[in-house]
Image: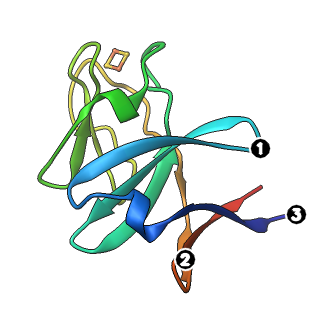
Amino acid sequence: SNSWIPVANQEDLIEDDVIGINVNGHPVALYLIDGEVFATDNVCTHGQALLSDGFVEDGEIECPLHQGKFCIKSGKAMCAPLTEDIKTYETSLDGEKILVRFE
Ligand code: FES
């Protein structure tokens, strides 16, 4: 079953930046890109690194450990050494609250 979980407030996010949160104990990265909120898994698909410690540029998140890049909107792995896309989550707004759709 899917449920929408309130995870943060809009004021917690900074344009072109990322924060790390926990949703039901699961590490999720939240981004604000061109005024739109996006969510992905926070642990890189390549190793034990948190994408929220990485760097957002041109709609991509760069992993801090080996500089692999994912497209934030699609989760697609964009370059080596990544071989696996990152899971993305739907987001929505309820007033100031950010909700993430989480299974
Ligand atoms: Fe992210 Fe290696 S752990 S690119």
Q: Is 95 drawn above or below residue 19 in the view shown? A: below
The amino acid pointed to by label 2 is Ser
| Residue occupying the point 20% across, 21% down | 67
Label 1 sits on what residue type? Asn
Figure quadrant of the C terminus: bottom right
Q: Position of residue 6 (x, y in %)?
A: 67, 65
Q: Mark 2 highlights which residue?
A: 92
Q: Considering the numbered disc 3 on the image, is that residue within a helix, a strand or a loop? A: loop
Dot 2 alpha-carbon crowd within 10 angstroms: few under 14, some 14 to 19, many 20 or more: some
Residue that extends furthest to the right in the rendered view of this protein: 1
3D distance between C-alphas at marks 2 and 1: 17 Å
Residue beneath the point at 27% across and 17% down:
81
Q: Dot 2 lies on which element?
A: strand
Q: Is residue 43 above or below residue 71?
A: above
Q: Which residue is mark 1?
A: 24
Vertical order, 41 against 4 (above or below): above
Q: Which residue is mark 3?
A: 1
* Mark 3 and mark 2 residues within 8 Å of each other at the beta carbon: no
Question: Where does the image place residue 92, in percent across and percent down from the top left?
Answer: 55, 77
Left or right: residue 92 versus residue 11 is right
97, 86: nearer the viewer: 97
